[in-house]
Image (cartoon, grey):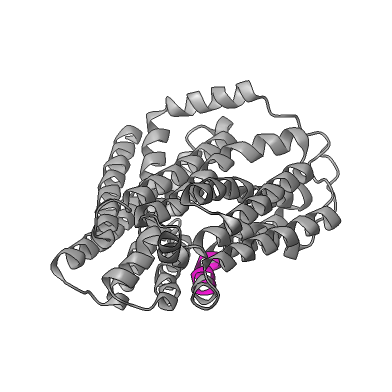
């Protein structure tokens, strides 16, 4: 007999705890040039506030699932939100770049709790039909958040300064913390068995021994989250290279979000009509071609069109959106016994690759060329990994 389900928490609460984790990464992007200037640091160090945030999200993928299975959803979520809020306070008053970098890493680890546990709570409290509906809404939030966050960040930074962006994170974390404390009961099924650390490590070792899992996980990370190289470099590309006002950065960053949304929509329409392996390779090729065009524009043109750069990244993101559902399905389906562990390890690898790419984009004197080189290199690796995976399957 299945355990009785607890009452579903209000959807607005789940949206609130989900929104904080994505907002804190993308809303901070327009502030990077001002952060570097005020804290007397380099552009590369400022971009590290993004790469470290992504790295924190990566480790959170591995952390919160086992903790919530053992201690419960409510206390684990409260702990994560408390860390997110406290780290936001440190960011708000950070006197040096080193303090800000450490606080951003902790903020990401805390913010990841809402991203992961909101979905677990939906599964705990909803039937099949309602689960699909609620997860679709939360999935939409993860796309809408990056779309509006740079616009909000640009408005706040240009009028009040970058520290007020950190104040927004503190306010959001405090509201989420209070809402969870007052409105969220424990939702973990009473019969759920606590996760054992030894079995989790054994599952990870089993998956990493699978060449097919490694191929699709490497290809998936390089074809989807390498995009963070452009996100981290965007304010320097549009502000310093293309001489556009800081408040316009958010508008240019909307193009990739729209492209990603179109790619996801097309992927759903093409499911069952186009072979998954073929879809992955062609979608990845679209991203690689867009990144190559961006690199050529940065190398050969003194000042490319800002909207031209945004449109190229929109096509890049469309390829990533097309590729993402197919490659993630391939990766987590390698061993049906280890679907949960595969999903966690795949998510960790995605974020780790995104953190590495955003850090590499900070190298060199021309951030546009650096970001484009990273995207081209990641596209080549993704193509090679997909071909390797198809060869293994055959």
> Does residue 174 appear left or right of residue 7 in this picture?
left
Taking the magenta stretch, the answer to whether it contains residue 225 is no
Q: State whether residue 275 appears in this view.
A: no
Q: How many marks?
A: 0
Residue 145 belongs to magenta span: yes
Q: Which sits in the foreground, 83 or 90? A: 90
Q: Along the horizontal axis of the image, is 391 left or right of 193?
A: left
Give the camera-side residue of 228 and 166. 166
Magenta region, mostly helix, strand or loop?
helix
Which quarter of the picture shows residue 91?
A: bottom right
Q: Which residues are magenta?
A: 144-152
Name the quarter where the N terminus is drawn: top right
Q: Can residue 130 be seen here?
A: yes
Residue nearest the viewer, comparing 365 with 381: 365
Residue positioned most to the left: 300
Q: Quadrant of the C terminus?
A: top left
**Residue 82 or 349: which is nearer the viewer?**
82
| Coordinates of residue 248 in the picture (x, y in percent) | 41, 78
Choose top left, top right, bottom left or bottom right for residue 39.
bottom left
Q: Is residue 263 left or right of residue 186?
A: left
Q: What percent of the width, then of the height, locates residue 167?
A: 63, 64
- x, y percentage for residue 63? 61, 37
* Residue drawn 74% across the image and 32% down it: 70
The residue shown at (39%, 74%) is 252
Q: 219 above or below 246?
A: above
The answer to whether residue 40 is above or below residue 355 is below
Where's residue 335, x and y in %?
Answer: 51, 32
Left or right: 289 in relation to 17:
left
């Amino acid at each position: 007999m299945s355990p009785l389900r607890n009452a579903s928490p209000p959807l607005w609460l789940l949206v609130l705890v989900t929104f904080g984790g994505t907002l804190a990464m993308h809303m901070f992007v327009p502030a990077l040039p001002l952060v570097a200037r005020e804290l007397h640091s380099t552009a590369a160090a400022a971009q590290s506030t993004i790469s470290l945030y992504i790295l924190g999200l990566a480790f959170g993928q591995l952390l919160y699932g086992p903790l919530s299975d053992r201690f419960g959803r409510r206390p684990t979520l409260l702990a994560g939100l408390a860390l997110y809020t406290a780290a936001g306070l440190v960011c708000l008053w950070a006197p040096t770049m080193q303090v800000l970098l450490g606080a951003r890493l902790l903020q990401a680890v805390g913010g990841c709790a809402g991203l992961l546990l909101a979905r677990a709570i939906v599964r705990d409290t909803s039937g099949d039909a309602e689960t699909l509906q609620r997860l679709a809404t939360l999935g939409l939030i993860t796309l809408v958040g990056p779309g509006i966050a740079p616009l909000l960040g640009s408005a706040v930074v240009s009028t009040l300064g970058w520290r007020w962006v950190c104040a927004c994170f503190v306010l959001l974390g405090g509201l989420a913390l209070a809402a969870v404390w007052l409105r969220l009961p424990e939702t973990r099924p009473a019969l759920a068995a606590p996760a054992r650390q030894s079995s989790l490590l054994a599952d990870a070792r089993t998956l990493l021994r699978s060449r097919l899992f490694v191929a699709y996980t490497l290809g998936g990370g390089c074809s989807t989250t390498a995009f963070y190289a452009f996100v981290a470099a965007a304010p320097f590309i549009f502000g310093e290279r293309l001489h556009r006002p800081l408040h316009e950065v958010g508008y240019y960053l909307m193009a990739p979000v729209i492209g990603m949304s179109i790619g996801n929509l097309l992927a759903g329409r093409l499911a069952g009509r186009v072979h998954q392996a073929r879809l992955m390779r062609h979608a990845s090729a679209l991203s690689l071609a867009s990144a190559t065009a961006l690199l050529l524009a940065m190398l050969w043109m003194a000042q490319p069109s800002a909207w031209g750069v945004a449109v190229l990244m929109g096509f890049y993101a469309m390829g990533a959106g097309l590729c993402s559902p197919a490659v993630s399905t391939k990766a987590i389906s390698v061993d049906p016994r280890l679907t949960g562990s595969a999903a966690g390890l795949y998510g960790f690898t995605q974020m780790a690759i995104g953190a590495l790419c955003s850090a590499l984009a900070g190298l060199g004197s021309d951030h546009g060329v650096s970001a484009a080189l990273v995207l081209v290199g990641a596209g080549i690796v993704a193509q090679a990994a997909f071909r390797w995976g198809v060869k293994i399957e055959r």
